[in-house]
Amino acid sequence: MARLVSQLLTLSRADNGARQLQLETVNLSELCEMVTLELEEAAQQKKITISLKSSLISS
């Protein structure tokens, strides 16, 4: 929860011009895979299945 609040404050400061965001190019497929892996354990504990299907992901 604290992390979420911190991220919202960062976005608010950037919106007000008080802070500059650092933009960078990211590989969306890799990012989606990382997020899926990060959430997988918590999902399994709650008996939720997470799957990632995309034409962007190379096999």
Image (cartoon, grey):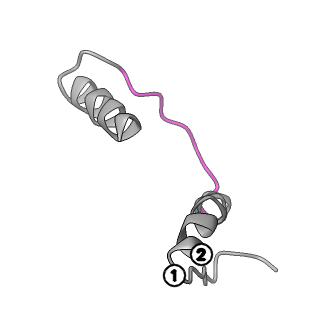
In percent of the image, x 82 and y 80: which residue is there? 59
Q: Which residue is mark 1?
A: 48
What secondary structure is marked by label 1? loop
x, y (%) of residue 43?
A: 54, 72
In percent of the image, x 61 and y 84: which residue is there? 53
The reply to whether residue 36 is visible in this rendering is no
Residue 10 image-quadrant placement: top left
In the image: residue 24, left or right of residue 6: right
The tag on residue 44 is 2
Q: Is residue 21 magenta?
A: yes
x, y (%) of residue 6?
A: 34, 30
Quarter the N terminus occupies = top left
x, y (%) of residue 50?
A: 56, 79
Instruction: Judge by depth and name the residue closer to the eye, 1 or 10.
Output: 1
Q: Which residues are magenta?
A: 20-28
Calculate the distance from the C-alpha at mark 1 to the C-alpha at mark 2: 5 Å
Q: Is 59 placed above or below 16 here?
A: below
> Marks 1 and 2: CB-CB under 8 Å?
yes
The reply to whether residue 38 is visible in this rendering is yes
x, y (%) of residue 34?
A: 65, 58
In percent of the image, x 68 and y 60: which residue is there? 30
Instruction: Judge by depth and name the residue closer to the eye, 47 or 20.
Output: 47
